[in-house]
Every structure is written in structure tokens, then in C-alpha cells.
Image (cartoon, rainbow, N blue to C red):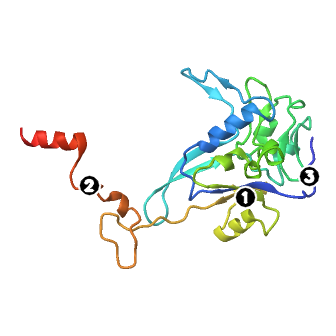
Amino acid sequence: MTTLPEKTDRKLGLVIDLDTCVGCHACVVSCKGWNTENYGAPLSDQDPYGADPTGTFLNRVHSYEVQPEEGTAQLIHFPKSCLHCEDAPCVTVCPTGASYKRTEDGIVLVNETDCIGCGLCAWACPYGARELDAAEGVMKKCTLCVDRIYNDNLPEVDRVPACVRTCPAGARHFGDLGDPDSEVSQLVATRGGMDLMPEQGTKPVNQYLPPRPKDELDRTAAPEDGEIDVLAPYLNPVADSPKGFLGWLDKTLEKL
């Protein structure tokens, strides 16, 4: 069995804003692309264009309809990948030592040459964050794009996980959550970042920012004094009457 380090020099991880994520799956696509072409063995797919496709993904987005105690229901998009837990059960259960947690940055990785594909780590992970690659016969998981974040050949702006670099909504943030003065730590403190399933006692490094209450303003009614209807400019007609082909068609139909 593999032992965990007593402490790590840093705690690199992700902060995911559930209020901002729009569920576009850009992070899923970029993760699949980068990790298929770079670190480790490719992420295989089986019958990808057939009737029953399957494949290996390190990051997935789930969508849920949530009914708050007050107000209307909300659709929440929930990205999920390895949380690089401080007390990672996937590491301690590994019989070959293939799964390990790095002392220098806290990233949990799998040495694919030592992995025998027994699946014990997947059983131990309470988050379902590990997948067995059917073609390679080894367990796969998020690496925080370790081959990007330390790559001096890349521009500094690109030295973040592919999912963070790609997110069009800015819902994903990366940094050292062990440093209270880091941008991600300050974001967690300001927005009340949460552990996923804290009752499991795994101490996940990754944090989630909760969705904020939605504006209950009735968009069909005139806004009250001091309130701004941010959708109003987009709902106003762009022209009083149709022009071009639609204008000709409208006039022609009027004569019938």
C-alpha cells in the first residue's frame, strides 16, 4: 500500500464557480484533447460513432435542477474531476504504489507503468473521479495538467490546466490553496468556498463556490425605482419594421 506525505509544500488545485459555469463542456473537450495527445497514454474511446459509445474522460460536467427553499428552481452545472484530496483513500488503497501524492505540490497522480488496473482506487474514491481506460487497462484521472503547469516552453498564460485556460465563462480558477494570500484562497474566503462531501473526511483540495440567489425581478413587468433590468436592451425590437427580403415579403402578404 502507498503512504501519503505528512504535508505538502503546496496545495495546487481548482476552484470552480457553480454560479458562473454555463455547462458548455468546453473544459471537457479541452481536457480530453490535451490528455489524449500529451501526458501518459491516450484516453481511448470505444465505438465513438456507433450506437453505444464509451470512452475515458478525466473531467465531466453533470447538470442538476435544484429547488431552493425560496424562489424558483435553478439549473446547476456541476463539473467534476479528481479533487487531489489531502487524505486521499485512492492512494492508500493502491496495492502496487502506482497511485501517489506528490510532496512538492500535492497533486495526486498514477504511474501507469505500475498500475495493474485492479480498480481498487476507483472503489475507494467517494467522488467517482477515476476511470479505467478499457484500451490501456490502467486507471486514469485528472493530473491538473502537470505537463502544462511546469512547462517553460509554453507562454506563462498557458501554464495552467487546459480546462482553466479554455473555460469561456471564467468559472475555473487554478492556484495554491495552501497559501492563504493566493488568488484562489482569497476567492474561497470571499465567496464561501465548500468542500465536496466533507463528511467523507478526505479533505479535498479543490473547492466549489456556491451559486448565488438569482434575481427574482419579474422581467415582464417594469422594474422598480433603482432596479435595472439587464435583459431589457436585448428584448427591445431591433427595428420598427422588417427590411430587406423580409420587408418585401411582409408588404407582398399585406396585398393578398
Q: Position of residue 24 (x, y in %)?
A: 55, 45
Q: Secondary structure at mark 3?
A: loop
Location of mark 1 (residue): 198
Q: Secondary structure at mark 2?
A: loop
Side of 44 where 176 appears, left or right: right
The amino acid on which the numbered mark 1 sits, given as a three-letter code, is Pro
Location of mark 2 (residue): 239
Q: Position of residue 20 (x, y in %)?
A: 56, 57
- On the image, which quarter does residue 170 sit in? bottom right
- On the image, which quarter does residue 253 sit in? top left
Instruction: Please identify, in this view, whether the residue under mark 1 or under mark 2 is nearer the observer.
Output: 2
Q: Residue at x 74, y 31 (%)?
A: 37
Q: Earlier in the sequence, mark 3 or mark 2?
A: 3
- Name the residue at the front extreme: 244
Quarter of the image with the C terminus is top left
The amino acid on which the numbered mark 3 sits, given as a three-letter code, is Thr
